[in-house]
């Protein structure tokens, strides 16, 4: 069966779409995907922006053909609420790791503010060894688990904005900081904690992390796993999730779109009776209500960005 025949015969049932989930603690992102694949009886599921098992918050899960859009979502900035504990260093830079060092804590709220401001001006960061970044074909955490040394170079990323919710809290000799961080793609909060401690001549470890925003998706839009498993929650369709303009095409144009052909405004005006073609910058082409491809205007022509 050709791709054209497959598209003709597809049903309107939403098996391609998104879920906005408030990831629970003590669960890996892969575990979450496996649970929801069974819940919706869909073979393919992926997620945008990995969260560690102990972290909670915004997770965008994609199912079916929507998984092809995850690379686009991964480029968006994110906002976190983080609590940092001073005086200890772990092998993972978070509280779930093994303590490998301890230092006295002699800091003030003003020192925390100054160190945070300094880090907010940096445009690069050294990733933690527990990252999944590959060097010479091997992930960083694989080097760490094998006790092998490798040079980790700084990567371009930065803090867009920050707010010190609680610059310094002291309780039973434990010093902590609570901070909201709005950061670019690829920024590691556990590395921020490490660097914050270094600037104040002590150790610092990530105690708690909650992602409250990813791109335009806010935590208030996310559902708990318990709610999803107990209630009849439908997937968000690709067109509803992206909120792009849509243009319904006929079979005359469909065969060109399936082959990734560049289109001109006249092609779509003649084919779809759309009147706002010249105003569009990025849009979804649909056939019989199903998303087929995303096109973007580049100069005076439309080029394919994604093909489902």
Image (cartoon, rainbow, N blue to C red):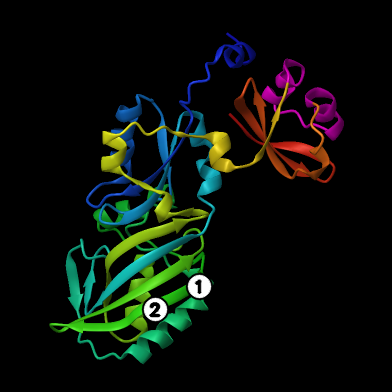
Gap between marks 2 and 1 measured at Cα: 10 Å
Residue 30 drawn above or below residue 97: above
The spot of residue 255 in percent (x, y) is 72, 18
| Residue 8 showing in the rendered view | yes
The C terminus - image quarter: top right
Left-right relation of 31 to 275? left
The N terminus - image quarter: top right
Chief secondary structure of the magenta portion:
helix
In this picture, which residue range is highlighted in magenta?
A: 250-272
The spot of residue 116 in percent (x, y) is 42, 81
| Residue 93 showing in the rendered view | no
Left-right relation of 79 to 52? right
The tag on residue 179 is: none
Left-right relation of 107 to 262? left
For residue 115, which quarter of the picture?
bottom left
The spot of residue 234 in percent (x, y) is 41, 32
Q: As rendered, which of 255 and 122 lies closer to the eye?
A: 255
At x 25%, y 56%, the residue is: 54
Residue 37 drawn above or below residue 166: above
Q: Is residue 271 magenta?
A: yes
The tag on residue 164 is: 2
The residue wearing badge 1 is 161
At x 29%, y 84%, the residue is: 168
Q: Residue furthest left?
A: 172
Q: Residues within 10 Å of mark 2 (few under 14, many from 20)?
A: some
Residue 190 drawn above or below residue 35: below
Left-right relation of 206 to 298? left
């Amino acid at each position: 069966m050709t791709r054209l025949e497959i598209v003709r015969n597809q049903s309107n049932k939403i098996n391609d779409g998104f879920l906005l989930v408030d990831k629970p603690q003590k669960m890996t992102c892969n575990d979450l995907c496996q649970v929801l694949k069974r819940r919706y009886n869909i073979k393919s599921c992926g997620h945008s922006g990995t969260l560690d098992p102990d972290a909670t918050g915004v997770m965008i899960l994609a199912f079916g053909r929507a998984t092809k859009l995850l690379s686009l979502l991964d480029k968006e900035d994110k906002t976190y609420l983080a609590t940092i504990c001073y005086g200890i260093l772990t092998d993972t830079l978070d509280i779930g790791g093994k303590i490998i060092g301890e230092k006295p804590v002699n800091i003030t709220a003003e020192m925390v503010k100054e160190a945070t401001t300094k880090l907010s001006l940096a445009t690069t960061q050294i990733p933690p060894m527990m990252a999944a970044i590959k060097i010479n074909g091997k992930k960083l955490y694989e080097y760490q688990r094998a006790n092998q040394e490798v040079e980790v170079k700084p990567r371009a990323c930065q803090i867009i904005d920050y707010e010190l919710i609680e610059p310094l809290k002291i309780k039973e000799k434990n010093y902590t900081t609570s901070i909201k961080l709005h950061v670019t793609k690829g920024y590691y909060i556990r590395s921020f904690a490490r660097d914050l401690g270094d600037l104040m001549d002590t150790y610092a470890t990530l105690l708690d992390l909650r992602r409250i925003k990813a791109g335009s998706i806010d935590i208030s839009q996310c559902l708990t796993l318990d709610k999803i498993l107990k209630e009849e929650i439908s997937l968000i369709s690709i067109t509803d999730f992206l909120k792009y303009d849509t243009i319904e095409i006929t079979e005359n144009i469909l065969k060109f779109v399936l082959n990734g052909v560049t289109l001109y405004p006249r092609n779509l005006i003649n084919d779809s009776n759309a009147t706002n073609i010249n105003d569009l910058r990025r849009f979804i082409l649909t056939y019989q209500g199903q998303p087929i491809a995303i096109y973007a205007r580049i100069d005076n022509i439309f080029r394919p960005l994604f093909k489902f």
